[in-house]
Image: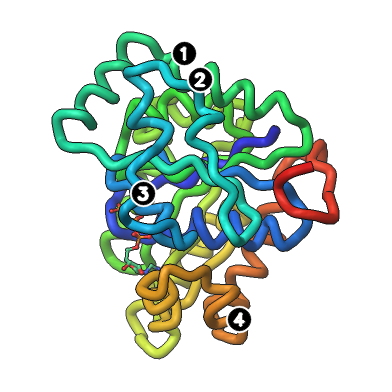
Amino acid sequence: MPLLCIASPKGGVGKTTVAANLADALRRGGQRVLAIDLDPQNALRLHFGVPLAERAGFLAELPRGIGWRSALRLTPSGVALLPFGTVTTAEALMVTAALEAAPALLTGPVREMLADPALLVVADLPPGPSRALELLAPLASLVLVVLLADAQGAALMPEIDSGRFLGLGGLAGRDSDGPRLVLNQVDHEARLSRTVAEAMAQHLGPRLLGALAREDAVAEALAEQRLLLDSAPASRAAQDLRELARVVAAALPRAVEPVAAGWAR
Ligand SMILES: Nc1ncnc2c1ncn2[C@@H]1O[C@H](COP(=O)(O)OP(=O)(O)OP(=O)(O)O)[C@@H](O)[C@H]1O
Ligand SMILES: [Mg+2]
């Protein structure tokens, strides 16, 4: 416990960037964190410096019923990682079919992870509605939706308000107030970005947990396969990230007990 899902109705908005860097920021805050990649793009691992040649992963092995613990790897950041695994299109479709036929293949292992009261699980979801999100949202303490501060982001507000893309008619499991949001790639120099961000903040009120600035440092960190707080700790986006981590930690159940060291106890 708890489970934090990072999702969005839209692709390319920064879900994986937020999932990886927020997992790292929360671990730096003293929590044991396990990050799971539920997107066949298998991109979460890139932020944690996992070599491209490493193909193994949790979801990729799902149809074969191999246990999640064998796919677990402790990254240099101290965050434990379950990569998706490298898959072909056919294999990705087999994973979806396996989840459809036997949802417990995913919910079973995730329930096992959540049984550890001191472990925070951060899940990176694929864009749009997905079977994985539908299965995990009811188990989540918090579903964090990432949107861009642009016209398309603003146009998605009714979709967010209705909760349709979560497949739950507006409810995100125990998080009865529905999803929380984070705005990404806010360009403080651009009038449109600033204006849209302000309008979205006004509309969302306390449902908006934070906003991250658009900065080259964020994309550069990924290019270096590093985490933002390692590669550019003084950047504005890093400051935004630390603030987001503080707010997210406060919004999660208090059952998580801080520990001094990394993931392993
Ligand atoms: N705050 C930011 N400033 C600058 N670049 C950013 C920022 N956030 C994300 N990016 C860049 O935007 C691109 C998309 O980010 P990311 O892969 O995290 O999005 P995603 O929502 O996970 O995409 P997908 O829907 O394909 O899974 C990446 O190149 C990333 O480095
Ligand atoms: Mg992604």
Q: Look at the picture and state if 160 lies above or below 167.
A: below
Question: x, y (%) of residue 63?
Answer: 32, 18
Which quarter of the rendering shows the N terminus? Answer: top right
**Which of the marked residues, 4 or 1, is nearer the chain's N terminus?**
1
Question: x, y (%) of residue 150?
Answer: 32, 68
Q: Helix, strand or loop at disc 1?
A: helix
Q: Check disc 1: other Cα within 10 Å, few if <14, some if 14-19, many if 20+.
A: some
What residue do we see at 43% from left, 21% from top? Answer: 66
What residue do we see at 43% from left, 66% from top? Answer: 184
Which quarter of the rendering shows the C terminus? Answer: top right
Distance from Cα at disc 3 to Cα at disc 1:
26 Å
Q: Nearer the viewer, mark 3 or mark 2?
A: 3
Q: According to the image, label 1 marks what residue?
A: 104
Q: Which three-letter amino acid code belongs to the residue tagged 4?
A: Pro
Q: Look at the picture and state if 263 lies above or below 215.
A: above
Question: x, y (%) of residue 192?
Answer: 33, 79
Q: Check disc 2: other Cα within 10 Å, few if <14, some if 14-19, many if 20+.
A: some
Q: Look at the picture and state if 185 lies above or below 1.
A: below
Q: According to the image, label 4 marks what residue?
A: 233
Q: Which three-letter amino acid code belongs to the residue tagged 3?
A: Glu
What residue do we see at 35% from left, 53% from top? Answer: 43
Distance from Cα at disc 3 to Cα at disc 2:
25 Å
Q: Helix, strand or loop at disc 2?
A: helix
Q: According to the image, label 2 marks what residue?
A: 107
Q: Helix, strand or loop at disc 3?
A: loop
- As rendered, which of 40 and 17 lies closer to the eye? 40
**Horizontally, is 77 left or right of 53 in the view?**
right
Q: According to the image, label 3 marks what residue?
A: 54
